[in-house]
Amino acid sequence: TVAEAYFGRSLAGGGEVTEAQWAGFLAEVVTPAFPDGLTALDGAGQWRAPDGRLLRERSKLLQVVLTGADAAAARARLAPVEA
């Protein structure tokens, strides 16, 4: 099972999560949760706002291969990282 989580880098009050902040999150939260390995990729997300504007945001995609886990187990393991 491959679990994926998408992380937008825009901050609610303005600005963006820096590479150093992302690296800290990986080291402190993600790596301890998935010590066997993971892949983190840069992304470019977009969506349409309710007013019709197209919004874009730099993002990170986290992929984790969970050998022997079904989809429900994968979601349960990934949930604390997404919180």
Image: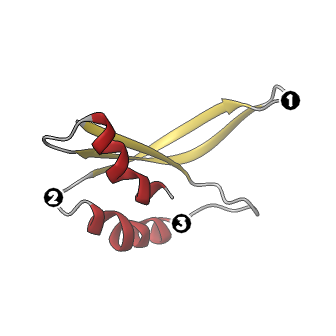
Earlier along the polypeptide chain: callout 2 or callout 3? 3
Residue 30: x and y, percent?
A: 34, 63
The amino acid type found where label 2 is placed reads Asp
Rendered position, 25 above or below 2 = below
Rendered position, 55 above or below 80 = above
Rendered position, 19 above or below 53 = below
Residue 76: x and y, percent?
A: 36, 49
> Which residue: 63% across, 61% down?
16
Mark 2 sits on what residue? 36
Mark 1 sits on what residue? 51
Give the structural element (helix, strand or loop) at label 1.
loop
Give the structural element (helix, strand or loop) at label 2.
loop
Q: How far apart are the alpha carbons under marks 1 and 3? A: 29 Å
Classify 10 Å Cα crowding around label 3: few (below 14), some (14-19), many (20 and above). Answer: few
> Which residue: 69% across, 62% down?
15
The amino acid type found where label 1 is placed reads Asp
> Which residue: 81% across, 30% down?
50
Classify the position of the N terminus by image quarter. Answer: top left
Q: Which mark is residue 18?
A: 3
